[in-house]
Amino acid sequence: MKKLLLSLAFTALHVMAANAENSAVEKKSDVVKKHIQEQMQREQKYAKEQKFYQGKDYNLSAVEVDPSDLDAIPTIEPENDFDMTDVYRDDI
């Protein structure tokens, strides 16, 4: 009878340990799946951004500037009398 109880207790402990190990593996698997899913979403976002930045699918010819139109813009000459001494004065 003692051997039977001891055998049942050992079997129960073995089953409990196996269940705990399986649940730990399942938790690890769930975490890995979650990380993989997050990484896939990041990759999709990156691919979408790269598609935008490379501009292969965009036709911007409608907003190009004609070089002959640039001649009508007057040239603004810089003022060469720029003086910073007033900036550092304390008596103003």
Image: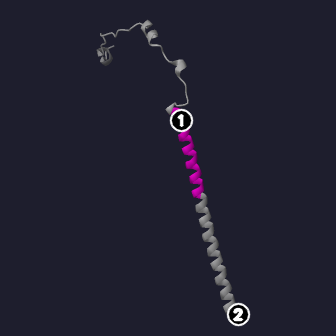
User: Residue at position x 29%, y 15% from top?
Assistant: 85
Callout 1: few (<14), some (14-19), or many (20+) C-alpha neighbours within 10 Å? few
User: Residue at position x 65%, y 77% from top?
Assistant: 15
Answer with the quarter of the image where residue 89 lies: top left
Do callouts 1 and 2 mark residues in contact (Cβ within 8 Å)?
A: no
Q: Secondary structure at mark 1?
A: helix
Q: In the rendered view, how is the structure colored?
A: one colour
Residue type (three-letter) at the residue carrying disc 2? Met
Q: Secondary structure at mark 2?
A: loop
Point out which mark residue 22 bears. Answer: none
Q: CA distance from mark 1 to mark 2?
A: 74 Å
User: Residue at position x 31%, y 14% from top?
Assistant: 86
Front residue of this view, candidates 85 and 79: 79
Q: Position of residue 22 (x, y in %)?
A: 62, 69
Most extreme residue toward the bottom is 1
Q: Is residue 67 magenta?
A: no
User: Residue at position x 69%, y 90% from top?
Assistant: 4
The magenta-colored residue range is: 31-53
Apparent side of residue 38 relative to residue 1 in the rendered image (left or right): left
Q: Is residue 8 above or below residue 33?
A: below
Residue on which the image places disc 1: 51
Q: Position of residue 92 (x, y in %)?
A: 33, 13
Q: Is residue 84 above or below residue 39?
A: above
Q: Position of residue 48 (x, y in %)?
A: 56, 38
Callout 2: few (<14), some (14-19), or many (20+) C-alpha neighbours within 10 Å? few
Of the 4 image quadrants, the one containing the N terminus is: bottom right
Residue type (three-letter) at the residue carrying disc 1? Lys
Residue on which the image places disc 2: 1
Front residue of this view, candidates 74 and 17: 74
Q: Position of residue 39 (x, y in %)?
A: 55, 49
Main SS type for the magenta part? helix
